[in-house]
Each structure stands twice: as structure tokens, then as C-alpha cells.
Image (cartoon, rainbow, N blue to C red):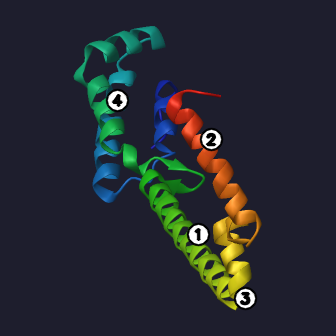
Amino acid sequence: METHPWLVARKQVLDNYRLPAEGATEADALFAQLEQLASGCADQGTFEQQLAASPLSQQYNDLLARYAKYFMTDGKTTDEQVEDLQAAAAQSAAQDHMESMVKRELHTAAMQALPDEVRQLKYGGLRVVPVIGPIIQWIDNIKWISRLFGRK
């Protein structure tokens, strides 16, 4: 059955939907009623006025709203796109977690391979150097006492 020219745009909107069987049946029934309304009108202006006044307009809007999750973009429905995004996020999270674990293990192994003196220097800084360490501690104590009594 050929679509009435005044209904072509409304019907083309549904071309972007992958309607299930019950949705397609419902759409066909609705468009049969719309065709009947259009055939009884002399011009498009009259048709649009009668459509706005009839419950068919709301039924069309309800149909679009009810089957919104079947709207297709890039050949996939909204639900399929969400599933793809969730799968990509899960894969990315798993990969990031694995990279983090590998880096942590490599860092731990590298630290354990270093001599004790180098490890102490890494974690304690210059404070572990025999002559410099006590000097740094002495300077820090002077700064602490100055702050304690409000002197600069």
C-alpha cells in the first residue's frame, strides 16, 4: 500500500527504528487509520488540523515514545549502543587494572634488587647519609623551634 504524501515524513521517522513484531503491527494499524483520515481531507492544512484534534496524533507520539529504545543510530539501537559502551568501559577498566598491577610489581621487584643503602637513600633521602643526615636534622630542629616561638 502506497503511503499518502502527507504521511511520508511521519512514516520515514519510523524507518530509523528497529521495531519488534508487536511494534510493527501497532504502527501499521496506526498508519491505516492515518491513511483513512488523510483520504477524507481536501488539503494538507485540513488534514493537519483534523490530526491535531484527533487522538491519532497522541497515539503516534506514544508509539514513538514507547519504542524509543529501538531507535537506531549507526545501525544499532540505543540499548545495543549502551551495551557496547559498557563492554568497552569494562575492557578498558580491566586493562588499566592489569597495567597498574604490572607496574606495581615491577617497581617492587626493582626496589628489592637495589642494595640496602640505595633503598634507604630513596626512602629516607639525604637524612640517611652519615654526615649530612645529622646536619639536616639539626637545621630542621632549629626551624621547628623558631616556628614554635614565632621567630623567623
**Distance of mark 1 from mark 2, alpha carbons?**
43 Å
Q: What element carries label 1?
A: helix
Q: Which amino acid does label 3 sit on?
A: Pro
**Distance of mark 1 from mark 3, alpha carbons?**
31 Å
Q: Which of marks 1 and 3 is nearer the N terminus?
A: 1
Q: Is residue 31 above or below residue 55?
A: below
Look at discs 3 and 2 and give the one toward the viewer. Answer: 2
Q: What element carries label 2?
A: helix
Residue ID at (66%, 76%): 120
Look at discs 1 and 2 and give the one toward the viewer. Answer: 2
Q: Which of marks 4 and 1 is nearer the N terminus?
A: 4
Q: Do the residues labelled 1 and 3 touch (CB within 8 Å)?
A: no
Reading the image, the residue beneath label 4 is 34
Residue ID at (39%, 53%): 19
Q: Where is residue 49 in the image (x, y as percent from the top left)?
A: 36, 9
Q: Is residue 113 left or right of residue 141?
A: right
Q: Where is residue 122 in the image (x, y as percent from the top left)?
A: 70, 71
Look at discs 1 and 3 and give the one toward the viewer. Answer: 3
Q: Which of marks 4 and 3 is nearer the N terminus?
A: 4
Reading the image, the residue beneath label 1 is 96
Q: Is mark 3 on a helix, strand or loop?
A: loop
Reading the image, the residue beneath label 3 is 115
In the image as oriented, which residue stretches furthest toward the left? Answer: 55
